[in-house]
Amino acid sequence: MPKKVIAIDGPAGAGKSTVARQVAKRLNYLYIDTGAMYRALTLKALKMHIPLTDWDLLTKLAQETKIELLSKNDKIIVICDGQDVSEEIRKPEVSQNVSLVALIPGVREKMVEAQRQMAKKGGVVMDGRDIATVVLPQADCKVFLTASVEERALRRYKELVEKGYQEPLDKVKEDIYRRDLLDKEREVGPLMQSPDAVLIDSTGLSIETVVEKILSLCGEGE
Ligand code: CDP
């Protein structure tokens, strides 16, 4: 069977990465977490104390930065300029600032180009905000995955607690809400459902149920 391209978009904390990783595993496809790329660049900019309002400098930074996504024992390893940043890119400071970096057109141009390269051979599941609309409009299967803001905040809160971060639930919810707003309102590659994407609201659904729904939508169900 020819290898397909599966695009999964949606707001923060909708469970895209968990679901996308499992869909990729079931099909023996490559999973590409595009959010991790924006996070890696944001982490680098924060470490270098670059003001996130300096779009020219951040565009230049995106052009000079090498970001690689590797798959190891079912986990995605994110390498930025040769260093493993997989854990660090998940810290709250990065989550709180990433949307400011992701709205810069020059940054997006560089990221989209790299993402298209990675998907060139097919057999990929890619998740993000603009995958079905901008990065891979020719994708075979397009899903817009969402959930209520309460559930998304709770999921993210639990993840953070597991990683040892002490963020109050209200703050996590506020951050998610603010990030979604910035992602939806930006000029280039905004978060939106592609007209040809299927909407899945995962509120109250298990990961397995969502994975099965996506597989059957893509004609790969049991
Ligand atoms: O995992 P979570 O839902 O928190 O977000 P993520 O997928 O790691 O993405 C982090 C941020 O990167 C998003 O809030 C967007 O600002 C940006 N992003 C984007 O602009 N375009 C993408 N294709 C993926 C992520």
Image (cartoon, rainbow, N blue to C red):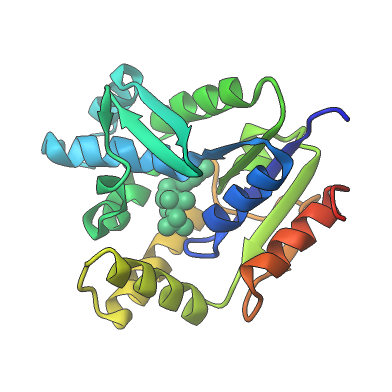
Which residue is farthest left? 49
Q: Position of residue 79 (x, y in %)?
A: 33, 30
Q: Quadrant of the C terminus?
A: bottom right
Q: Position of residue 116 (x, y in %)?
A: 60, 25
Which of the 4 image quarters holds residue 189? top right
| Numbered marks: total | 0
Residue at the location (45% across, 63% down)? 181
Q: Position of residue 106 (x, y in %)?
A: 40, 27
Query: Is 167 located above or below residue 144 in the figure?
Result: below
Residue at the location (29% across, 48% down)? 87
Q: Quadrant of the N terminus?
A: top right
Query: Is 16 located above or below residue 173 in the figure?
Result: above
Which of the 4 image quarters holds residue 58? top left
Q: Is residue 73 left or right of residue 145?
A: left
Q: Is residue 104 left or right of residue 171?
A: right
Query: Is 76 located above or below residue 208 in the figure?
Result: above
Q: Is residue 147 visible?
A: yes
Q: Position of residue 217 (x, y in %)?
A: 84, 54
Q: Is residue 220 left or right of residue 94?
A: right
Residue at the location (65% across, 49% down)? 8
Q: Is residue 182 visible?
A: no
Query: Which is more toward the observer, 61 or 53?
Result: 61
Query: Is 32 located above or below residue 9 in the figure?
Result: above
Query: Which is more toward the observer, 46 or 219?
Result: 219
Residue at the location (84% across, 48% down)? 220
